[in-house]
Amino acid sequence: MRYTEYLLPTLKETPADAEVVSHRLMLRAGLIRKVAAGIYNYLPLGLRSLRKVEQIVREEMNRAGAHELLMPMVVPAELWQESGRWQQYGRELLRFKDRKEADFCLGPTHEEVITDIVRHEVRSYRQLPLNLYQIQTKFRDEIRPRFGLMRGREFIMKDAYSFDLDDAGADAAYERMYQAYRRIFQRCGLNFRAVEADTGNIGGSSSHEFMVLAESGEDAIVSCDSCEYAANVEKAELRAPATDEPTPTEGLKKVLTPARKSVEEVAAFLNTSPQKLVKTLIVQTDKGETLAVLLRGDRELNDIKLCRLLDCAWVEMAGEEVVLKATGAPSGFAGPVGLKLRILADREVQGLADFITGANEKDAHFTGVNLGRDFAVEAFADLRKAVAGDACPRCEGRLQIWRGIEVGHVFKLGTKYSEALNAVVLDDQGRERVLVMGCYGIGIGRTLASAIEQNHDADGIIWPLPIAPFEVLVVMLNPNDAEVKAAAEQLYAELLGEGVEVLLDDRDERPGAKFKDADLLGIPLRVTVGARGLKDGQVELKERAGGAVAMLATVKAAEDIAARLRSARVHG
Ligand code: ATP
Ligand code: MG
């Protein structure tokens, strides 16, 4: 490719509305352009990298025995009504009518469509196992599209769906996808973790999210510093604290804490540490219940765990009015003693004695509070958020906390969709069996953006070779110098002849501007052809990652570079 014939609009300025580095660099390096909120053009250079990610995904899916097909983006409402999701799915589902007033949606995911295919085309256990996938544009009307391709409304996803006769088959399919995902993200050059994820109320029993570790990640994950355990913070189990039966030594005593509401304020005022406090959260559920949850003062509630315990969809902190009504005091002074609400507590509270709580009275707290003697708890459970340094639930290690970007998701679905759409096959006894399904997604654009989050410096992108838009950039220093021009053209032709993906910067620009763009674009190898080097029969090779420089004999340069690339592809 010749730069002068290409559409490669690089930007010097940092675009104002781009908050994360991958978004900034994708705009600056001319990979994407915004059309509307969460909707992008993929410019030629961006599309090249996107296609590389797709190709890696495709190869690994095929290797794992999945078969590619392509479903429509526009889906009739009937299928979604059959599964019940037409009603359940929120406003992320873009619904519309055609000219005959029939309802349609843009597919945000394709469980219904694929299950419809399989229920019509698959009749016998002999046709199983089956795993079908597509790489296709999805639409989700995200409430807050942001970070460029990271959270778009229109985005490209690989979605695969497995169909098996029984649970054991479905588990094997899941395991194959899990391994394929590991290979895919390794090949993309990403530092990632596969973490146990919450299965939410979608149903299904096992789920892993593939998380790329990056500061800008929207998810918090924990991982053990000595074993393989990793989980979304929402799901992270905590080891039950080793608690001795607490022995109360103090009597219950009311103390004045004027205008001290927060745990920190009260602890400082009473000259003690937050760990000596037990905080009482007044919580409301979607089922209309108001209840109290006790946590050690320095801990935070994990509302997903609470929802699971209560079997409800969401919980929220009660507003001022509800707190006043439930406790008789403004918020900041709630406590379990004398409280007329159901009380749940985090397991850690079970081991505490002589602690401090609110007194359900404005400007007052109790000290010397003790379980059993002063109040009763209905149940103790794991309700708090994990923090760095917590004990690993699986081994003697300690948990670390990371930020992560979810690039892929494997999910054992079970029979939710096959039951709803009646996707059955006959087994070897001639009995009808409901198919057991799994679904497996990878965000193609998000994977690309994550790779940039992990591979860049102050000057620009540093592409991992397997997903770089080009492998080599040949910089023709002065196109007006006939000798330089001829040498650069020849090298370009030779590299193409070697099967190398090469971009020739043949623009009539200052060297400084060309080098700046080279760093911004992040193509792994840069070869500079200039008058000074040519005098010694040499061109300069520079690696974008690490910056190592070598002089190559002009006559052997193409061959050398091709050899380097071959060995990088094998060992990379
Ligand atoms: P998130 O929690 O980030 O909204 P999700 O869990 O809803 O994502 P899935 O339904 O699991 O997403 O979709 C599979 C994959 O598709 C995700 O792992 C992610 O890589 C990608 N993806 C999902 N939503 C978006 C989006 N709005 N923009 C870009 N990629 C997305
Ligand atoms: Mg997900």
Image (cartoon, rainbow, N blue to C red):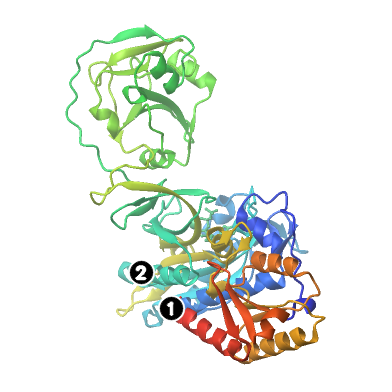
User: Residue 116 appears at what percent x and percent y?
Assistant: 53, 71
Which mark is first along the chain, 2 or 1?
2
Q: Is the residue at mark 1 in contact range of ligand 1, meaning its CB lies under 8 Å from it?
A: no
**In the displayed structure, would residue 565 be above or below residue 245?**
below
Q: Is residue 236 visible?
A: no
Using the rendered image of the protein, determine whether residue 464 is visible from the camera's viewpoint: yes
Q: Image point 72% across, 49% down: which residue?
A: 16
Q: Residue at x 63, y 92 (%)?
A: 497
Q: Percent from the top left, x then y, of residue 90?
A: 59, 49
Q: Compared with residue 213, is residue 31 higher up or lower down, i.e. above or below?
A: below
Residue 530 percent coordinates (x, y) = 71, 79
Quadrant location of the N terminus in the rendered image: bottom right
Other residues around mark 1 within 10 Å, as few (<14) / some (14–19) / many (≥20):
few
Q: Which mark is residue 299?
A: none
**In the structure shown, which secondary structural element does the residue marked by tag 1 occupy?**
helix
x then y, percent, for residue 532: 70, 79
State the mark number for residue 175.
2
The residue under label 1 is 571
Q: Which image quarter has ligand 1?
A: bottom right
Amino acid type of the residue that numbered disc 1 sits on in the rendered structure: His
Amino acid carrying label 2: it is Glu
Q: Is residue 73 above or below residue 122?
A: above
Q: Nearer the viewer, residue 334 or 249?
A: 249
Q: Cα distance, mark 1 to mark 2? A: 26 Å
Task: Look at the numbered discs 1 and 2 and tell me whether their residues touch, using CB distance below 8 Å.
Answer: no
Asked if disc 2 is less than 8 Å from ligand 1, the answer is: no
Which one is nearer the viewer's eye here, 542 or 307?
A: 542
**Picture quadrant of residue 478:** bottom right
Q: Residue at x 28, y 34 (%)?
A: 347
